[in-house]
Image (cartoon, rainbow, N blue to C red):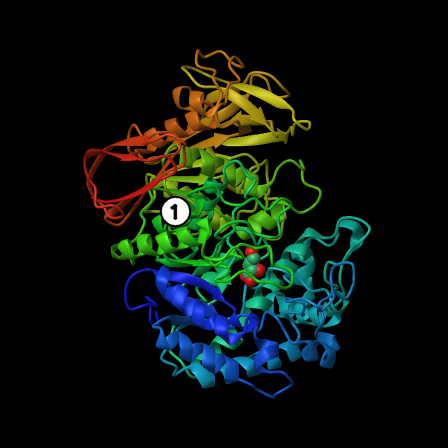
Amino acid sequence: MPGYPVLPDGLAYGGDYNPEQWPEEVWQEDVRLMREAGVNLVTVGVFNWGLIEPAEDVYDFDRLDRILDLLHTEGIMVDLATPTSSPPVWFRNRYPGSRLVDREGRVLGGATRHSFCPSSPDYAAASERVAVRLAERYSGHPALAMWHVHNEYGWANAHCYCATSAEAFRAWLRERYGDIGAVNAAWGTTFWGLTYGSFDEIEPPVHAPVGLLTGLQLDFMRFSVDAHVANFRRERAAVRRFSDLPVTTNFMIPNCKPMDYWRWSAEVDVVANDHYLDAEGPDAHIDLAMAADLTRSVAGGRPWMLMEHSTGAVNWQPRNLAKRRGEMRRNSLAHVARGSDSVMFFQWRASRHGAEKFHSAMVPHAGTDSEVWRDVVDLGTDLGRLAPVRGSRVEADVAVVWDWESYWALELEWRPSADLRFRERVGAFYAALWREHVTVDFVHPSADLSAYRLVVAPSAYLLTEASAKNLHRYVEAGGHLLVSFFSGIVDENDTIHAGPYPGVLREVLGLSVEEFHPLREHGTVTVAPATGIGGSVGRIWSERVRVGEAMPVWTFADGPDAGHPAVTRHDLGAGAAWYVATALDETHGATDGTHGVAHDTARGSASRDPYGLRGLLREVLDHAGVRRLAGVPEDVEVVRRGAHLFLINHADQPATVPGVTGTGLLDGVEHRGSATVPPGGVAVVRT
Ligand code: GAL
């Protein structure tokens, strides 16, 4: 991999630096403050296209020269961006054919960034040219550490429906299918008699009166990812003509549904991610952990870079909550715990103009006499102390299946229940595992699974035959698999696998499903153990499971499938495959073998009374032999990264974690047998 790690030592600390918004006197103060805070890397030039190429093929690098030179003088390294996510005004006017068109056929406005068609040949030519000029000029600059191509591919212009895109889509289909008969077969066009006579007849999935061919929609999504990847590759090649420094682009995992980041991961030298908290979400820190674990997984387990997050509020949520005391530090160190070798922010200094002026920054509008600034300086000190963590890896015994294609397919229109959402389902399993203090990797269902004791597949709706075989082999070889309802239903064309549901998973699960019985909005069913303890409330879904080789573990106690299995286990080869046929509440106190007694799902009771999904997971984790640290308080996040144990206390009380011996990297404290972490605090212990 060219040049990883990007800095000579330690973790990278900094953010997007957009000094072109300020007079030069401010730059002097900027670099002085950067040094005060321990900033060592800044991303420069992200939105500079119209400034460095003010007219077509006319360049002005003066200001950028001065910025890079100044940063170099102060010993601050540069992550130099190609500015192509924000085409200049002249470009849009000169090349109207490059404008972005939405699904309704509207040409979208231009007084913003990202407003261009990803398949436009004019955009391709112009973006390549500016990337070449930039790389030619700065590849030898001593401040340069890495390249940041574009910004957040596909965030606002993932899909374009203009005539150029339609033509490119048809070319893409020709390449994929070869002949039109194969397209008709894949999309099942005989239904509604929609058979195509030639590729030229195919339209993108534009707004239509009723449901469109679903295979067409999936292929259009795949095509659109390829269009963005092609743009990235073109610019990467431009940069590589002059430079062998690492090249990346900032992903938005998992908040950019249209981008299949498994497809993207091999394209970059180091995976970089932008993550913004869902500030109002009650479990924002768990969402953050999930994003970080997914990013590490996309990076193939290698260290990755947190390229953007925020010191406080963002500007684009319905209510932009500021971070609470200590939250920015916990967020930052949680990313590091889960494999990031950097903590970077959008942006260095808060903007005075435009759309993002209420977005927090490292230097807020309040200036340096502020809590935010003092926290920024303290974080620099923390990160300096965490230098030994760099490059180390996070190991996980448990993997969760995540497939963007299945995400897309599950959420197309006309599914059995509008309440079934991919992120919610994966998030529910992830949160329950987080509370059990289990670190997980995410995997594509076709990946090598042999490193994991347990693989969890929540509503893996789209599953190819090859992936299903992979899961089968994994179980036979001794793996443990937990699958939830509405998995293994369709192939890559959204065609139902033959035979009773769940087509390609029937054998590994040892069961079939006769009929789905989705519940009414807010409806619930109760499930009770076939023997022993357990039980829960189920939501969203019930279905008629018929066991073959599998044995029932829990049973539906009421609802449309009363008396039929709700949770099953199939011992197969050296492993076992579990199945759960409803959306279990995380906790539910049916402790005595009866059902529907205590509906207390409060955190406090959860740890005493962890049935529901958590109870099931405990059972499965034990069965699979997944080891966890015992006695860890509920709200403490525990992650091992190499020789270091990160303990992040999300509660308002001090938390004592037993079984910890070693030296605290942040505070030098010696822990002998246990570590106490202050309320909202973080300990990183070298064990
Ligand atoms: C990111 C983007 C930044 C900034 C930030 C605000 O998605 O890359 O340029 O807009 O959001 O949260």
Residue 59 position within the rendered picture, expressed as x and y whole percent measured from the top left: 57, 86
Q: Nearer the viewer, residue 566 or 587?
A: 587
Measuring 26% from the left and 50% from the top, which residue is drawn there?
642
Residue 302 position within the rendered picture, expressed as x and y whole percent measured from the top left: 35, 58
Quadrant where the N terminus lies? Answer: bottom left
What's the residue type where badge 1 is placed? Ala
Is residue 506 at all visible to an observer of this figure? yes
User: Would you say 591 lies left or right of 184 here?
Assistant: left
* Position above or below: 478 against 194: above
* Position above or below: 552 against 26: above
Q: Nearer the viewer, residue 362 or 60?
A: 362
Secondary structure under tag 1 reads helix
Splitting the image into four quadrants, where does ligand 1 fall? bottom right
Quadrant where the C terminus lies? Answer: top left
User: Which residue is labeled 1 in the image?
Assistant: 334
User: Would you say 286 lies left or right of 321 here?
Assistant: left
Q: Looking at this rendering, what residue extends furthest in the front direction?
A: 369
Q: Looking at this rendering, what residue extends furthest in the bottom direction?
A: 58
* Quarter residue 357 falls in: bottom right
Residue 193 position within the rendered picture, expressed as x and y whole percent measured from the top left: 79, 53
Is residue 443 at all visible to an observer of this figure? no
User: Would you say 668 lies left or right of 596 here?
Assistant: left
Measuring 70% from the left and 74% from the top, which residue is drawn there?
98
Q: How many labels, in total? A: 1
Q: Looking at this rendering, what residue extends furthest in the right direction?
A: 209
Mark 1 Cα-neighbour bin, 10 Å: few <14, some 14–19, many ≥20? many
* Quarter residue 225 falls in: bottom right
Q: Nearer the viewer, residue 515 or 273?
A: 273
* Position above or below: 535 against 312: above
